[in-house]
Amino acid sequence: MLQKERPSATAGDPAKPILELRNVNKTFGSVAALHDFRASVALGEFVTVVGPSGCGKSTLFNIVAGLEEPDTGGILRFESRSVHASDLLGRVSFMPQRDLLFSWRTVIDNAILALEVEGVPRKKARAEALGLLPEFGLSGFADHYPHQLSGGMRQRVALMRTFLFKRELMLLDEPFGALDALTRAMMQRWLLDVWQKNRRTILFITHDVDEAIFLGDRVLVMTARPGGVKLEQRVDLPRPRSPDIVTSPAFIEIKRALLAAIEEESMKSFAAANFREYAQ
Amino acid sequence: MAAASKTSAGLFSTGHTVLRLVAGLAAIAVAWQASVLLFGIRPYYLPKLSVVLDAIASTPAAYAASVARTAAETLLGYVTGAAFGVLLGSVFFHHKVLKDTLFPMFVVSQTIPVIAFGAVVVLWFGNTLFAKAVMAFYLTFFPVTVNTLLGLQSVDPAQEALMKSFGAPHRQLFWKLQFPNALPQIFVALRLATSLSLVGAMVGEWFGDTTGLGVLLLQATYNENVVGIWAALLVASALGTLFYASVAGIERKVVFWRAEQ
Ligand SMILES: Nc1ncnc2c1ncn2[C@@H]1O[C@H](COP(=O)(O)OP(=O)(O)OP(=O)(O)O)[C@@H](O)[C@H]1O
Ligand SMILES: [Mg+2]
């Protein structure tokens, strides 16, 4: 998976943003999903995104993956070039919120889907994927079909499929949302390990504040819908991070700041929902 | 290991189905024979099963030739109709304008009673095997077209989006996602079309022919040969059942993920 040698600075180099969004809006009919969203992601950076449910996180990812065009007027820059969202198709490695495995394909053939699309011969792609199975906790399951797997395993197959689509920028939409706490903690450490070795740029959505801090160089807290950036929090915890870092004072201080911001936004979306109910 | 367990499970369930089928047939046979004997049903309404079987056994060559002929007509029409249906459904899927203009016409074409259509087909193609195959074709392609279109349209938009995010062109979107996703729906129509195509071929034979199950049925009716009618019926349903079971067996192999979910 290692593609290029890169300096081993922990946080990405802010002078070299791979992705920049400014004044990005997205409306679906009368629903404003994103409003004046702005963010910049540096090469090699790990940015986590938290926000109340329905605030537009997946919409943001759909735009960056090239699947959804933002409203006109916004600025979208990728690798220092101004682009349309659709230009990003095939250039960003995207893991959607659901696993979306193809039920007629085995684990190994689901994992190599992107490679096949790129034209890599099946045999070669399979050989590469087979070597990765242990790392993804899927040894011995190469020939199983999705309906024979647990939810956690399905998610890991989806993650593997995303990793095998080797692009500089990876978008992970709640990749560990379906996992139990134990597997989840394991996968977090594993992901950091893989990231440290390969240094790809990651944008990572989660509902879990601990996860957001533990993984990220930076946490973006989104506002209630329409989603914008409420708070940008640097996480200056040293890497590699050990699991007990979550009890360190620095971690707790960051967590306090984030929770306050999230609380405020959750209250807003809750109040909005209540208001709509009364209005009906 | 997984593949092995899958196959054995498949065989097991296939074996089970065959067993159930045989048991069901045996029950019908016993009920048939017993009710004729018990209630004293007159042979005019329902002859004894044993008599019907005797009739078949006494002229096996005629029945064998008829089965071969009708099976050939049915199969030819069915296979070409299925292929055409899948092709047409795919074309409609890709060209909405074509679908919107042609599809209503296909619906109308299916409201023409097959008998009326049969007369025309015999005028066009004469008393050939081909003419009967055309009837089978006509009854097969329509449900296959409709279900192909439905299946192709039933793709999860999120899976489509995923393929697009990999940069997949239309061709790959079709072959790697939309088409396999449509297979379960297509097979529903393929199973339905087995009996339809057999009906098409047999009705086609009524417009004039010398061999075939439809011919046997018609001759027996003219001659008020009740045993002959029932014999033709029995052989036709055996052929139909075998045909249906074969397609269902292929279905289980091809769209295994549906059966095991
Ligand atoms: N294709 C669409 N058409 C209409 N409305 C949409 C569409 N996609 C998203 N929305 C709306 O945009 C808003 C944001 O949705 P989005 O899926 O981005 O939220 P989210 O932050 O990912 O939520 P969650 O945390 O529950 O996954 C929602 O109100 C949703 O109903
Ligand atoms: Mg979402």
Image (cartoon, coloured by chain):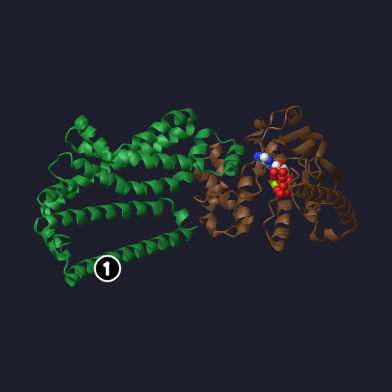
Extreme residue in the bottom direction: B38
Q: Nearer the viewer, residue A163 or A198?
A: A163
Q: Residue at x 68, y 51 (%)?
A: A175
Image vertical order of residue B259 relative to residue A198, above or below: below
Q: What shade does chain B have? A: green
- Residue A35 x/y as whole percent: 79, 36
- x, y percentage for residue A180? 69, 61
Left or right, B84 with reference to B226: right
**Residue toward you, A217 or B30:** B30
Q: Is residue A51 visible?
A: no
Is B18 located above or below residue A105 in the figure?
Answer: below
Residue A49 locus on image (x, y percent): 77, 46
Identify the residue under disc 1: B27
Does residue A24 appear in the picture of this structure?
A: yes
> Splitting the image into 4 quarters, where does residue A182 fall?
bottom right
Q: How many marks?
A: 1
Q: Colour of chain A?
A: brown
